[in-house]
Image (cartoon, grey):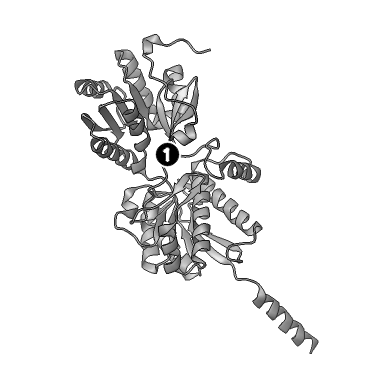
C-alpha cells in the first residue's frame, strides 16, 4: 500500500514538472568543419544555459539536442528529420550554406521553424521558404558598407574583384548590382582565379576606367598580392576595400602597407551592439576565450528564437513563423529584420579601417562614433610607423 501511494505521488510530481522545450540543431562535430563549428555550438550552449537560468521559455526549460552531420551536407537533411521525429519543436540551422540548403528543405517539408544562423548564400532563400528565417548578414550585404563610404567620398567609378569561389563571387556580383543602382558612372567586375599572384592585368583594367575605388572579395593572400602590385606600380586609389584585410594574416604579410585599407568584420567583442558586452563577458567566463563571429551568430539565432516564441506565446509552427516574420529586434550582430523570403534585411557587416596597425570601425556611423574615414595616403607619402 505504501509503495503504491509513493508511486502515485512520484507520478503526480513528474506530471507537474514542465516538459522541456526541445530545440534541435545539426552541427559538424567531426570532419573538416568540426573546429569552426565548435564555436558555433558554444554560442548555442551559452544561450540555452542563460535562458534556463532565467526560468526557461514559456516556463519550460530548453533542451538542446545536437546531431553530427560529419561535415557532409548530404547528411544534414536526414539528421534534421531525426530531430523532428524525436520531438524538436524548433530548429537552429547548421554551419554552412550547403548544409543549410538541405536542412532547410527538411524544415519546409515538416513545416518546422528553422533559424538560419550560418547559411549566408542567397540560394537558401531563393525559393521563398515559409519556415526558414535568416539571423546573420547574407553575402549580398557585404558591399553595402564600402559602397556607402564610396558614396560619401563622392566616388563615381569602382573596380570590383571577386575570387572564383561561391561566397566571394556572390559578394562581388551583389556589389556590382548595388553600385549600378547607386548610379555610379563606371562599374566593372572581374572574377579572378585563386592561382593569380600578380594583379597587374586587373590594375590596368581599373586604370582604363579611371576607377577611383577598388573593392576586393577574396582571401588574405590575394589582398596582399594586390597591395604589392599597387605599390610596385604606384597606383593609389581614393578608396581601397578588401574583405579580408582585417585578417591578422594580411597585416603579417604586408606590414604597414596595410594602413588605410578598409575591410569587413561580421562581429567583434568591441562592437556597441545590443547586449554585446554582456554576451562577450559571459562567453569568456564559460569558454575561456573571446567569442568570434560563429559563436555570436549562434547566440543571436537563439535570442531571436526566444523572442519569437515569447511573442507567439507558443511553439506552434504557424504562430511562431508569423511572429518571426514580423519581428524586429536588436541582437549582438545588429538589427534582426527579414524580408518576405525570410532573408536577413537588417544586419550588415561592419566596415573597419586599418589605422596604425589596428582595425577600427568606420561604418555604420552608430558603431564608428566620432571616428571618420581617413583618406588613403599614397605609398610614397607615408611615414614609417614606430
Left or right: 370 as drawn, with respect to 170: right
Left or right: 121 as drawn, with respect to 184: right
- In the displayed structure, 199 sits above or below 88; it is above
Residue appearing at x 42%, y 39% in the figure: 349
Residue appearing at x 32%, y 24% in the figure: 197
Q: Residues within 10 Å of mark 1 (few under 14, many from 20)?
A: many
Residue appearing at x 65%, y 43% in the figure: 285
Position in image of residue 67 (x %, y %) = 50, 59
**Kind of element beneath mark 1:** loop
Q: Nearer the viewer, residue 23 or 322?
A: 322
- In the displayed structure, 221 sits above or below 366; it is above
Residue appearing at x 30%, y 34% in the figure: 162
Quadrant for the N terminus, please: bottom right
Q: Looking at the image, can residue 76 be seen? A: no
Left or right: 267 as drawn, with respect to 143: right
Position in image of residue 263 (x %, y %) = 41, 30
Q: Which residue is situated farthest in the left direction here?
A: 208
| Residue at the disc numbered 1 | 349
Q: Looking at the image, can residue 221 be seen? A: yes
Q: Nearer the viewer, residue 360 or 15?
A: 360
Q: Nearer the viewer, residue 94 or 76?
A: 94
Amino acid at each position: 500500500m505504501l509503495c503504491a501511494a509513493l508511486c502515485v505521488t512520484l507520478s503526480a510530481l513528474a506530471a507537474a514538472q514542465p516538459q522541456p522545450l526541445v530545440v534541435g540543431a545539426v552541427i559538424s562535430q567531426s570532419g573538416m568543419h568540426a573546429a569552426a563549428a565548435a564555436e558555433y555550438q558554444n554560442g548555442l550552449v551559452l544561450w540555452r544555459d542563460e535562458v534556463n537560468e532565467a526560468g526557461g521559455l514559456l516556463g519550460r526549460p530548453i533542451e538542446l539536442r545536437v546531431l553530427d552531420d560529419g561535415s557532409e551536407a548530404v547528411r544534414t537533411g536526414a539528421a534534421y528529420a531525426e530531430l523532428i521525429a524525436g520531438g524538436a519543436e524548433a530548429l537552429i540551422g547548421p554551419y554552412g550554406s550547403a548544409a543549410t540548403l538541405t536542412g532547410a528543405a527538411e524544415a519546409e517539408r515538416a513545416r518546422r521553424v528553422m533559424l538560419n544562423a550560418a547559411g549566408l548564400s542567397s540560394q537558401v532563400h531563393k525559393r521563398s521558404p515559409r519556415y526558414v528565417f535568416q539571423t546573420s548578414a547574407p553575402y549580398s550585404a557585404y558591399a553595402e558598407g564600402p559602397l556607402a563610404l564610396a558614396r560619401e567620398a563622392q566616388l563615381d567609378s569602382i573596380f570590383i574583384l571577386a575570387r572564383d569561389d561561391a561566397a566571394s563571387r556572390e559578394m562581388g556580383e551583389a556589389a556590382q548590382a548595388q553600385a549600378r543602382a547607386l548610379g555610379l558612372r563606371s562599374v566593372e567586375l572581374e572574377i579572378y582565379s585563386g592561382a593569380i599572384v600578380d594583379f597587374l592585368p586587373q590594375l590596368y583594367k581599373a586604370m582604363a576606367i579611371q576607377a577611383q575605388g577598388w573593392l576586393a572579395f577574396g582571401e588574405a593572400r590575394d589582398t596582399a598580392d594586390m597591395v604589392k602590385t599597387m605599390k610596385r606600380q604606384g597606383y593609389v586609389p581614393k578608396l581601397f576595400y578588401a574583405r579580408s584585410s582585417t585578417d591578422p594574416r594580411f597585416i603579417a604579410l604586408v606590414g604597414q602597407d596595410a594602413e588605410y585599407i578598409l575591410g569587413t568584420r561580421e562581429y567583434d567583442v568591441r562592437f556597441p551592439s545590443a547586449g554585446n558586452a554582456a554576451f562577450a563577458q559571459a562567453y569568456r567566463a564559460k569558454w575561456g576565450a573571446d567569442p568570434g563571429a560563429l559563436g555570436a551568430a549562434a547566440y543571436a539565432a537563439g535570442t531571436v528564437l526566444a523572442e519569437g516564441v515569447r511573442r507567439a506565446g507558443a511553439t506552434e509552427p504557424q504562430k511562431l513563423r508569423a511572429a518571426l516574420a514580423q519581428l524586429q529586434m536588436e541582437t549582438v550582430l545588429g538589427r534582426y529584420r527579414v524580408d518576405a523570403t525570410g532573408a536577413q534585411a537588417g544586419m550588415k557587416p561592419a566596415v573597419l579601417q586599418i589605422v596604425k596597425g589596428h582595425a577600427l570601425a568606420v561604418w555604420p556611423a552608430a558603431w564608428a562614433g566620432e571616428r571618420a574615414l581617413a583618406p588613403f595616403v599614397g605609398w610614397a607619402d607615408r611615414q614609417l610607423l614606430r
